Image (tube, rainbow, N blue to C red):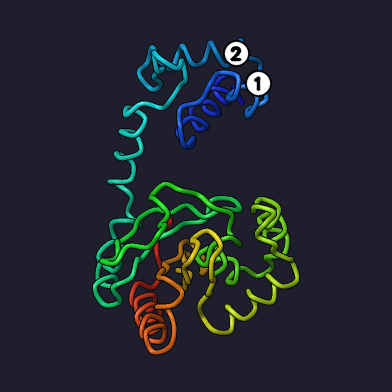
Amino acid sequence: MDTTVAKGMAVLEALARAKRPMRLAALTEQLGLQKSNVHRLLNTFMELGYVQQDPETSRYFASLKTWELGAGIISTNSLRRSVAPHLQAMQEKTRETVMLTVPVDDEVLFLDRAAQVRALRYVPLNGTRAPMVFTAAGRAILSRRPDPRDAVARSIAACPPEAGFVLSQVLEDLEKARRDGYASLVGGFTPWARVVAVALPGPGGAPAAAIAISGPEERMAGDHLAEVLDVLLATAAEIGEVSPT
């Protein structure tokens, strides 16, 4: 592996995921790299147009040129293209937010969504990542793996401590999700919401993605929850096997 390229990508990824522009010192501390190396990489990225610096605060941020790369990739993603019509149809039937996610290591990546009419207080943006056990979609994927214990343990370690997840309880929840055919989670990565999710199999049967429906906990109950689950399970059966790319 070319270490210079690896360090450069780490810098760019950190800026792209940051909630706000970052100071050089904060970026250096976060990445555990030498200040001179990070500064040199930032200057290179600025010359290439992928990073900009606020003239007033001297803080760095990823430019729209970085966004262009992601936008170009997502527009050609076959999984997103094939599932998008189903997301829209699910949203129209349930009037809730519908999301498509894919597993990336021990996290899920929110790939696409169809927004609900009545907005939640918080809905993950496309391109956001979260530890698997912190999301219903991630749990749906884990529940379809033959031995998820190690992945669950790593995912719990990556969650905020206040989440209070316990390995034995999460494994019990996954077993229930396996029996029910769907995972359900209140709170987690989507506060004030109940999210239900189903894994979508890829070639060979391993879970390659998950679709989820999210709504306020008080609304996602009783008859409405039953209707949402019917739509979710029927759509997953209709989609069938998906390609992860």
Quarter of the figure that contains the N terminus: top right
- Quarter holding residue 219: bottom left
Q: Residue at x 63, y 27 (%)?
A: 31
- Mark 2, secondary structure of its residue: helix
Above-or-below relation of 237 to 129: below
Above-or-below relation of 85 to 222: above
Closest to the observer: 103 or 37? 37
Task: Look at the numbered discs 2 and 1 and tell me whether their residues touch, using CB distance below 8 Å.
Answer: yes
- Mark 1, secondary structure of its residue: loop
Give the class, few, some or many, for how many residues have Cα within 10 Å of label 2's Cα (few <14, many ≥20). Answer: few
> What residue is disc 1 on?
33
Above-or-below relation of 18 to 238: above
- Quarter holding residue 150: bottom right
Say left or right for 160 vs 186.
Answer: right
Q: Residue 205, image x and y in percent?
A: 51, 69
Q: Which label was assigned to residue 37?
A: 2
Say left or right for 203 vs 31.
Answer: left
Q: Residue 25, image x and y in percent?
A: 60, 19
Q: Residue 68, image x and y in percent?
A: 30, 33
Closest to the observer: 215 or 106? 215
